């Protein structure tokens, strides 16, 4: 009788568990990234989203082993195909960077030196990892540039970075990042400096990488619109902590955390009348040294109440089907979590309708009585 092969469970490409990054300041350690956990599957695109200063780049740089500030403390684990990147010696990290994990940045000028042609720099990157002649490396460079949609790639390869438009430079940088077929591409705000049309083209390109190059992507952005268009999974960071995570579609339809909901409320609606002004989130995230004891979003949250003030709320499943807290309108999607007391109190946010959100009117008074009348500043009256 044939023996049945055991069912193979796909192992994730990257499993980050309780990643913490702290920098020393005035004689003590300041946590900048706290207990960030996520899983990135093969060929998946995960969006890491949050306002400026929320710790997105520090998270990425920690994964790449690129933080060299004196006294920095990095704990937790980041298993890349089972190998922990945290604490890995620089020599081993250098071997992984470029070959297995590559990173692209907002400003392509940081990746290219101005004094060599684009082609020369991509050739060198290829030759650093593979035994190829100059001619073979150049053929590969031209092919990569063509794959990235660069017109006339052979001639473009002979140009200097400053001779290319922003969009072409970004394509060339992605070509360089992909030159050694990395399994993981970390893209830190890759479209922020580009105009909207070019941004859409670059996002198309990033989406296509999973089929053409088999790559998984960690896409860092402050723009929920970019996440909606591109990412399978979303992780919302606030003040260095995970505010919410889950499948993008579910998280956008049923945000479980008031911060996610507020970010979503600030995206222009696709249909219907355009609002005169989009709601903005009043206030600013706390400086790392001044984080409140409880929920870091508390000072800006319309739903804040006493329970939120003492300790940071843990991540809890939002509206898991069958839970005693399951309420009308909550997401049934497994894998969605929010660091907020509302789901645990049985008062999840109602699903998003247009750009508005509110708590369930059947909620116990604890979560309703404290809400100020207007959810967010509309920005009216600002210059
Ligand atoms: N090397 C460093 N030393 C001390 N603080 C840092 C360092 N790098 C970043 N930070 C602080 O970490 C916080 C998060 O920064 P960052 O990850 O760049 O934010 P984001 O990419 O989300 O805009 C900021 O408050 C920033 O000032
Ligand atoms: S309701 Fe409380 S725990 Fe939830 S986001 Fe607002 S302040 Fe934080
Ligand atoms: Mg950044």
Image: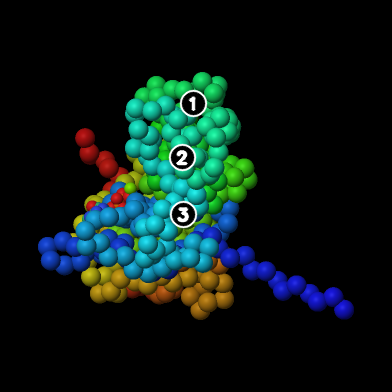
At 38% from the left and 42% from the top, the residue drawn is 105
Distance CA(mark 3)–CA(mark 1)? 26 Å
Give the residue number, with chain letter if any, for mark 1. Answer: 157
Secondary structure category for the residue under label 3:
helix
At 87% from the left and 79% from the top, the residue drawn is 1
* Vertical side of 91 occupied by 214: above or below: above
Q: Locate residue 276, reporting x and y percent.
A: 36, 36
* Vertical side of 363 occupied by 151: above or below: above
Give the residue number, with chain letter if any, for mark 3. Answer: 96
Give the residue number, with chain letter if any, for mark 2. Answer: 125
Marks 3 & 1, CB-CB < 8 Å contact: no
Q: Locate residue 53, reporting x and y percent.
A: 28, 51
Q: Are there few (<14), some (14-19), or many (20+) residues within 10 Å of tag 3?
A: some
Secondary structure category for the residue under label 2:
helix
Dividing the picture into quadrants, the one containing residue 4 is: bottom right
Q: Are there few (<14), some (14-19), or many (20+) residues within 10 Å of tag 1?
A: many
């Amino acid at each position: 009788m044939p023996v049945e092969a055991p069912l193979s469970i796909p192992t994730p490409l990257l499993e980050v568990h309780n990643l913490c990054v702290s920098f020393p300041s005035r004689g003590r350690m300041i946590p900048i990234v706290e207990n960030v956990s996520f899983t990135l599957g093969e060929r998946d695109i995960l969006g890491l989203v949050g306002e400026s200063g929320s710790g997105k780049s520090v998270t990425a740089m920690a994964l790449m082993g690129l933080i060299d500030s004196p006294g920095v403390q990095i704990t937790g684990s980041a298993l890349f195909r089972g190998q922990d990147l945290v604490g890995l010696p620089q020599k081993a990290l250098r071997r992984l960077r470029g070959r297995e994990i590559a990173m692209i940045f907002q400003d392509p000028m940081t990746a290219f030196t101005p004094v060599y042609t684009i082609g020369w720099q991509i050739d060198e990157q290829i030759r650093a990892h593979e035994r190829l002649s100059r001619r073979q490396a150049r053929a590969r460079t031209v092919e990569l540039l063509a794959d990235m949609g660069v017109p006339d790639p052979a001639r473009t390869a002979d140009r200097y970075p400053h001779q290319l438009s922003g969009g072409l430079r970004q394509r060339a940088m992605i070509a360089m990042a992909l030159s050694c077929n990395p399994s993981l591409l970390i893209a830190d705000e890759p479209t922020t400096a580009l105009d909207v049309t070019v941004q859409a083209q670059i996002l198309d390109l990033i989406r296509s990488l999973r089929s053409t190059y088999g790559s998984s992507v960690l896409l860092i952005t402050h723009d929920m619109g970019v996440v909606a268009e591109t990412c399978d999974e979303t992780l919302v960071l606030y003040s260095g902590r995970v505010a919410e995570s889950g499948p993008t579609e579910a998280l956008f339809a049923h945000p479980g955390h008031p911060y996610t909901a507020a970010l979503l409320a600030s995206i222009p609606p696709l249909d219907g009348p355009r609002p005169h002004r989009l709601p903005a989130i009043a206030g600013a995230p706390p400086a790392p040294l001044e984080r409140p004891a409880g929920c870091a979003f508390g000072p800006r949250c319309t739903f804040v109440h006493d329970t939120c003030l003492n300790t940071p709320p843990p991540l809890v499943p939002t509206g898991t089907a069958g839970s005693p807290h399951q309420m009308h309108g909550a997401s049934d999607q497994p894998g969605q979590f929010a660091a907020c007391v509302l789901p645990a109190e049985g008062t999840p946010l109602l699903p998003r309708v247009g750009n508005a959100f509110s708590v369930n009117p059947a909620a116990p008074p604890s979560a309703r009585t404290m809400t100020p009348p207007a959810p967010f500043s509309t920005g009216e009256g600002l210059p």
